[in-house]
Image: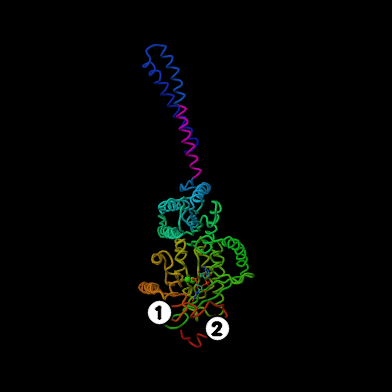
Amino acid sequence: MSPRRAAAFIAIIYLILGLVWIRFSDQFALALAADSNLLTELQTFKGWAYVIVTTGIFYFLSKTALDREHNLSERDGLTRLLNRHMFARELSSEIEFCRENEQTMVLIVLNLDGFKQLNSTAGSDVGDRYLQSIAGLLRDHFKQRVLLGRFGGDEFAIAIPAVTWLDQVLPQAQHLQQLIQAQIIPELPDSALSACFGIARFPADSSNAEQLIEAALTALEEAKSMGSNRLRLYKSEYGEHASKRTKLLFDLKTAIANKKLSIVYQPQFNLTDQRISGVEVLARWHHPEEGFIPPDIFIPLAEQHGLICAITDFIMPTAIRELLHADLLYGSIPRLSFNVSAADFNTNTSTQRFLHNLADLPGDWSVIELELTETSALLNLEGVKNVLKVLRERGVQVSLDDFGTGYSSLNTLRLLPIQELKIDQSFVRDLANNAHDARLVKTILAMANALHLRVVAEGVESQQQARYLQQQGCQEVQGFLYAKPMGLQSLKSFVHNIRASAVQL
Ligand code: C2E
Ligand code: CA
Ligand code: CA
C-alpha cells in the first residue's frame, strides 16, 4: 500500500469511528443513566473512553502500516526473498549462532547464465516471471532451514546453517543446477538457462558474513570464468585469479584489436576411405609475456565480456582465406568446421555477420560447418534457429559439439537442423576401461545411424579406442592419434604426405 493510501485508510477509519460515536454514544448514555447527575458523569467518562479507544486503534493501524513498509524494504520486491542488506544481517546472526554452537555453515551464491539475453529477446516481463519461478524453485528445493536472498539482477544466495559435512550440500547444489536447467520458461518452452554456483564455508573460508559473501562471490566469478553451468568451491588463490583475469581481459582486447590471435587446424578422418574428411578450426593466443593461453581460458573470458563475436569475425574469414589461398579448401579439405558460441547468435545483425564472414567462398557453402554446443544453443534457441534457417538454405552444415554432456541432448536434436554429432572426448577417453562409457558410445552411434546423422568421435588417442569406434560403426574420428592441431604450413605438408602415402590409419 502506498503511503497516501495508508494515510487515507487510517483517516477513513477515524471518520467512521467518529460518526458512529456521535450518532450512538448519546443514545447509549441516555439509555443507561436515569438521572441527570449520572448522565453528566457518563458524559465525562464517554470523552475519556473515546480518546482511549481511538488511541488504541491509531496505534494498531499505524504500526501495521509501518511494519509493512519496513518488511518491504527488507525484501526484494519481485521475489520476496531477502535483499542483499538484510541477507547479510541475517547471515551475521546465523554465523554467531553457528559459532556459539561450534557448527559450520555453507553459503551458495548463484548467477544465471544467459539471463540478460532472455531479458532482451523475450522482454523484461518474461525475465521477471522467470526470476520469480527461480525464487520458487529455491524455496521448494531445500528441505532444511535455509536463508534465501536475491542480490539484485540474476544473482541469488542460499545460506545453509548447521551443516556437518560439505558432502551433504554438494549433491543438493548439483541437483539444483539440474533443476534450473529443467526449469520451463512458458513463453519460450524450448529454451533453458543454466546457472553457475560459487560456494564458501564458515568458518573454513571466512569468519564473518561480509567476507563469507565475498568468498562465495569470488568462487562464483571463478566458476563463470570457466563457462556456463559450472560450480566452484572457494579457494584462496581465486582472488589472485580474478586480478589476473582483469589483466588478461585487457590484453585480450588488445590482441583482438591488433589481430594477434592465430589459427590452428585439426584434421578429421574418415575411417572407411582413410581420407581427411574435414578440419576443425581452433583459435590460439600467444600472449607476449605469459606465452600460450589455452582457449579454455580465453574463450569463456571473451564470452563473458562480449568479445566472442570479434573473435569469430576474425577467425572465420581468415581461415577461409588461408585455406583458399593454399588451395586446400573444396579439394583436399572437403569440410571446414568452426566453433561458435551463444553470443554469435545474440543480435539482430548475427545473420548478416555470418553471411559477411562467408562471403569470400567461391563455391558451395556446404563445405562450411558450424559446431555449437547444446548449452550455448539453448541459451538463445530462438536466435540460433533464426540464423541457422538462413545459413542452412545456403548449404552450411551444423554439428552438435560435446554431444552427451548437455542437459537433454536428444531434445536439442529435435529443435535444431543438425547434420552431425561430435561425441565428447570424455566418453572416448575411458572407452577401453569403462564398460558404461563404451555402452553409451555404442548407443549414441546406433541412434545417430537411425537418425541419419554423421558422427565424429573426438579426442581419439589410442588404437584401442579407434578399433572400438570402428567396430561400432563410427565413420569419422579426430584426435591426437591421427593429428594434433597444426598451423597452416604444417597442414599443407600433412595433406601433401597423406596424398603421397595414403597413410595407414
Ligand atoms: P572443442 O571444440 O571441444 O575442441 C576440441 C579440443 O580438443 C581442442 O582443444 C583440441 O585441441 C582438443 N583435442 C583434439 N584431439 C584431442 C585428443 O586426442 N586428446 C586431447 N586431450 N585433446 C584433444 P583446444 O584447441 O584447447 O580448444 C578448447 C575449446 O576451446 C574448444 O573445444 C572450443 O570449445 C573452444 N574454442 C577453440 N577455438 C575456438 C573458436 O575459434 N571459437 C570458439 N567459440 N570456441 C573455440
Ligand atoms: Ca569443437
Ligand atoms: Ca568438442
Residue 179, percent from left and from top:
41, 58
- Residue designated by label 2: 493
- The boundaries of the magenta stretch are 54-74
Residue 191 seen in render? no
Q: Quick one: which residue is furthest to the right in this view?
A: 289
Mark 2 vs ligand 1: CB below 8 Å: no
State the SS at label 2: helix
Residue 137, percent from left and from top:
42, 53
User: How many numbered dots are placed on residues in this image?
Assistant: 2
Q: Nearer the viewer, residue 102 or 297?
A: 102
Residue 468 shows which numbered tag? 1
- Marks 2 and 1, how far apart at CA: 29 Å
At label 1, the amino acid type is Tyr
Choose the circle earlier in sequence order: 2 or 1. Answer: 1
Question: Along the horizontal axis of the image, is 21 left or right of 357?
Answer: left
Residue 121, percent from left and from top:
48, 56
Residue 201, percent from left and from top:
51, 56
Q: Residue at position x 61%, y 67% from top?
A: 255
Q: Nearer the viewer, residue 375 or 136?
A: 136
Residue 495 seen in render? yes
State the SS at label 1: helix
Q: Nearer the viewer, residue 176 or 419?
A: 176
* 68 inside magenta stretch: yes
Indicate the quadrant where residue 187 lies: bottom left
Q: Residue at position x 57%, y 69% from top?
A: 314
Q: Nearer the viewer, residue 433 or 246?
A: 433
The correct choice, above or below, for 179 with respect to 312 in the image is: above
**Mark 1 surroundings: few (<14), some (14-19) or many (≥20) residues within 10 A:** some
At label 2, the amino acid type is Ser
